[in-house]
Image: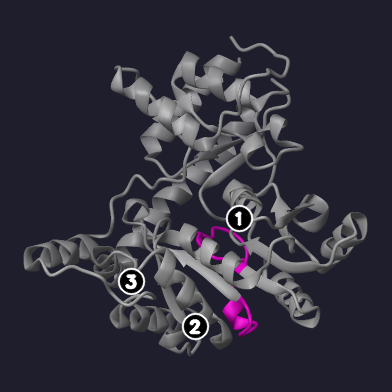
Amino acid sequence: MFSISKRSEVEPFHAMDVLAEATKRRATGHPVISMAVGQPSHPAPQAALEAARAALVAGRLGYTDALGTAQLKQALARHYHDRHGLVIDPARIAITTGSSAAFNLAFLSLFDAGDAVAIARPGYPAYRNILGALGLNVVEVPVTSETHFTLTPESLETIQAEKGVKLKGVLLASPANPTGTVTGREGLKALAAYCDANDIAFISDEIYHGLTFAGEETSALELTDQAIVINSFSKYYCMTGWRIGWMVLPERLVRPIERVAQSLYISPPELSQIAATAALGASDELDGVKASYAANRELLLGRLPKIGLATASPMDGAFYAYVDVSRFTNDSMDFARRMLVEINVAATPGLDFDPVEGPRTLRMSYAGSEAEIAEALERMGGWLK
């Protein structure tokens, strides 16, 4: 039986902390179901695994160019042509050690210490943390049903007036983590136009592309050639541990990004680049994985309200349910701790994503198997009854 608790004074319980604690409990025999991190349960595509095996047998793995192999960049250029009807010069594509490296490279190359960069709140916590670590002024813009849970030119104007700042950058994810928001073509077009007109760098995080279940999935590259687009093989391609991502850059940024990448990373891992090149041809297999996420999504949409957990935002894309737990608690960290300890279900407290409203929200990943999601819901239903 769960009871309402006061906010605790314990250290924050973040996504990776939840994962670490869940791993410890599982190692000691507890039947843990983890819905804490965006970790696909499906392995990398078969074509990627076969390409990696062949590369390991050949044994000739080493440094590549700092911005990646020509083969992978050419394959990504074909991907944009086939999926979006775009002609992208492969020279504008930078391969990175996961999207995390791409964010570091973009921020270091675009901004100076003290520059103001806008992000959505709630949003992926690494944005805030990396920007802050680099000495940048993080401007968190609240997104609600009134703004369709995304950034808008009007919300950017308002926040600049309130904070007394001039934005140098805007970072938007679509589909978004944790809200699942898909910013439609017109919304994305208005935002890109606003940034172009006001000399603001526009960074489009498209990591969850391919995982849209409702709404209109659009790449910023369809609307402007000045956007910095960041993507990854971690989510749709089920390759989190391979640590391989990419950027599409305006021509003027290619050489600056390359120089920073040479110093920080030398090059992305060649084995992962070989596997990623093969993964781009595995859309049939990966669309089957997406269908399993869609089934999990329907299960959650039907069951969550019945156990008292209303969704706090649309579940249009990515693979997360962002839920309102205020009926049960005003401390999502304590809620997440107790849920893990008492029923062995791991989820991420909303404070990770929103330092203001987060104590009343929780994020659950539905990238696992349908059986796991169903069992987690059964446990939660009994616990919250």
Residue 379 lies, in percent from the top left, at 48, 20
Q: Is residue 384 left or right of residue 37?
A: right
Q: Residues within 10 Å of mark 2 (few under 14, many from 20)?
A: few
Looking at marks 2 and 1 on the same chain, the residue that comes earlier in the sequence is marked by 1
* Residue under the point 63% across and 82% down: 226
Q: Circle 3 — which element?
A: loop
The answer, for residue 236, to whether it is visible in the render is yes
* Eye-nearest disc, 2 or 3: 2
* Residue under the point 42% across and 60% down: 98
- Quarter where residue 120 is shown: bottom right
Residue for badge 1: 176
Q: Is residue 265 left or right of residue 158?
A: left
Q: CA distance from mark 2 to mark 1?
A: 29 Å
Q: CA distance from mark 1 to mark 3?
A: 22 Å
Residue 268 lies, in percent from the top left, at 34, 66
Residue for badge 2: 255
Q: Is residue 376 left or right of residue 127?
A: left
Looking at marks 2 and 3 on the same chain, the residue that comes earlier in the sequence is marked by 2
